[in-house]
Image (cartoon, helix red, strand yellow):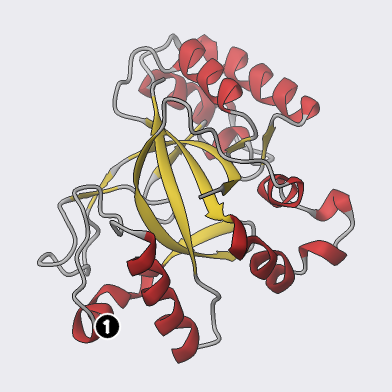
Amino acid sequence: MKHVSGGYYIIDPCPRPEGMDETLVPPIILSLSEYFCKFHPDTVFVTYNVSVAGKRRYARQLGLPETDYAAIEKWVEDRFAEGLFTYSQVFMTLATARDFCARFLTHVPEPLLVGIGLPEELVQYFLTYEGTLVKPDKERYGFEKLLLNGIEVEKTGATLLGYELLAFEYGAFITYLFNGQEREYDEHFDFKLNEHGLIPSLEEAMRYAKYSNDESEEYFWLPWAIFSYSR
């Protein structure tokens, strides 16, 4: 199956947030929602008018000298200019993400390098729902451009971790776990997550997505495959 790339991300898995059903969700989860997991580089480098103090703090968190914040800042600015890194914290190629890891994350082993892919037959649904096809190119998010180009997520050396139901709002992904849908799924299906807090198969993810999309029109949920890579 072809999974069309939605970009590459560097993410810290996070403890299960309060309010999630601990009988259904594992203690540590991986999510493409920035409401739960921390992404790299930190948002201080993709947000305007952030103080230098915040950037120095981030450098310290990475085990780097405080003054290295300037090198991170320049790297981000240069990759933005080249179209290889875009809002919000999306690496357009695997090589670009690996370059950031090699330069700045050598002292922090926790972050995972992942890529996401949407099953090819679902891409048109996403593009139509989000109005991507009628947006001016300058208003399209980076991963929308990847979907438009039909570029397949890198499979060489990749490990499929599972699927996450994601909706899109204001330039960022929202996970179905955000509003406790795991409890609804458990009531209606044989709902189980794997050790990463992800849905094990596309068939299951499609079933849950259909249920949620039929129940409510607030969000449009689609199953995204999440692949991990060596850094």
Secondary structure under the numbered disc 1 in the rendered image: helix
Q: Left or right: where does residue 218 sit relative to residue 10?
A: right
- Residue 156 vs residue 144, the one in the foreground: 156
Residue furthest to the right in view is 136
* Three-letter amino acid code of the residue under disc 1: Glu
Q: Left or right: where does residue 24 sit relative to residue 9?
A: left
Q: Position of residue 206 (x, y in %)?
A: 42, 70
Q: Quadrant of the C terminus?
A: top left
Q: Is residue 168 above or below residue 13?
A: below
Q: Position of residue 40 (x, y in %)?
A: 48, 33
Residue at x 44%, y 51% (from the top left corner): 225
- Residue 186 vs residue 176, the one in the foreground: 186
Q: Which residue is mark 1?
A: 184
Q: Position of residue 13 (x, y in %)?
A: 30, 41
Q: Position of residue 114 (x, y in %)?
A: 44, 36
Residue 91's image quarter?
top right
Residue at x 58%, y 18% (from the top left corner): 72
Q: Is residue 200 above or below residue 122?
A: above
Residue at x 60%, y 56% (from the top left corner): 120
